[in-house]
């Protein structure tokens, strides 16, 4: 099993250090109770005005026709590896507030928060998630009858970790690469745009 636990500049929660997005998934079935726990975690994410603008379309390989419909919505580059995942999902955002029908400019932010809590719960349960931007939104809307009041956000592959050897060579190499992130100084500012945060006792090149 690939262990891609990251080395962080500062201490973080172990679950966050262990989370990563694989392409190789085991054919092991995801237990229904675990799947429901993931969705329960998403349910309790924060949202603007507690609107909870997220929805999730969830298909498993046990429902082969629905699984095939969602798989065919993915671009070919994602379909190559996502076909091994026992669960596929779509995250969907409701575009207007239910309370007054005004546009909800925070909807995508809040859907991201819900998926973020799902990711943490998945990691705690030994499951892995890979989100995908590469899918046909119009096709997904049509085949799953998603109303115009909502918009598909991301496709999601979910399951237990598989063996990188099952992947094509180009994907296998990517699977084994070390995880990388920008340094904090690349996106954290203080007192003005691109000005160092300058916390007391912290080296200015870091913060």
Image (spheres, rainbow, N blue to C red):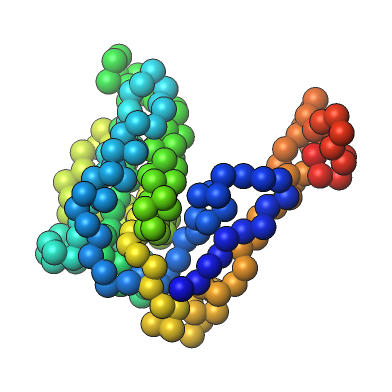
User: At x 48% / y 85%, what residue is drawn?
Assistant: 169
Q: Is residue 76 visible?
A: no
- Residue 68 placement: quadrant: bottom left
- Residue 84 placement: quadrant: bottom left
| Most foreground residue, 165 or 88 | 165
Q: Residue 56 location, x and y as percent?
A: 27, 44
User: At x 41% / y 40%, what residue is drawn?
Assistant: 117
Image vertical order of residue 164 relative to residue 69, above or below = below
Count of labels shown? 0
User: At x 41% / y 50%, what residue is drawn?
Assistant: 124
Residue extending furthest toward the top = 100
Q: Residue 126 location, x and y as percent?
A: 39, 58
Where does the C terminus fall, quadrant-wise? Answer: top right
| Most foreground residue, 6 or 102 | 6
Q: Is residue 52 visible?
A: yes
User: At x 43% / y 53%, what residue is drawn?
Assistant: 123
Q: Residue 26 location, x and y as percent?
A: 32, 72
| Most foreground residue, 152 or 64 | 64
Q: Residue 175 location, x and y as percent?
A: 51, 73
């Amino acid at each position: 099993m690939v262990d891609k636990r990251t080395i962080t500049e500062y201490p973080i929660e172990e679950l966050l250090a262990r989370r990563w997005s694989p392409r190789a998934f085991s054919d092991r079935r995801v237990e229904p109770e675990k799947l429901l726990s993931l969705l329960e975690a998403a349910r309790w994410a924060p949202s603007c005005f507690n609107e909870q603008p997220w929805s999730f379309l969830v298909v498993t390989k046990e429902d082969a026709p629905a699984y095939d419909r969602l798989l065919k919505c993915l671009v070919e580059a994602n379909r190559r590896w996502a076909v091994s995942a026992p669960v596929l999902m779509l995250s969907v955002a409701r575009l207007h507030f239910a309370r007054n029908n005004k546009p909800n400019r925070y909807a995508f932010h809040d859907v991201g928060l819900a998926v973020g809590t799902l990711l943490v719960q998945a990691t705690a349960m030994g499951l892995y998630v890979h989100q995908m931007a590469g899918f046909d939104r119009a096709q997904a809307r049509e085949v799953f009858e998603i109303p115009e009041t909502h918009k598909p956000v991301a496709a999601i592959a979910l399951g237990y970790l598989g063996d990188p050897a099952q992947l094509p060579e180009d994907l296998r190499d990517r699977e084994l690469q070390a995880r990388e992130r920008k340094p904090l100084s690349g996106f954290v500012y203080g007192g003005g745009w691109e000005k160092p945060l300058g916390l007391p006792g912290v080296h200015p090149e870091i913060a």
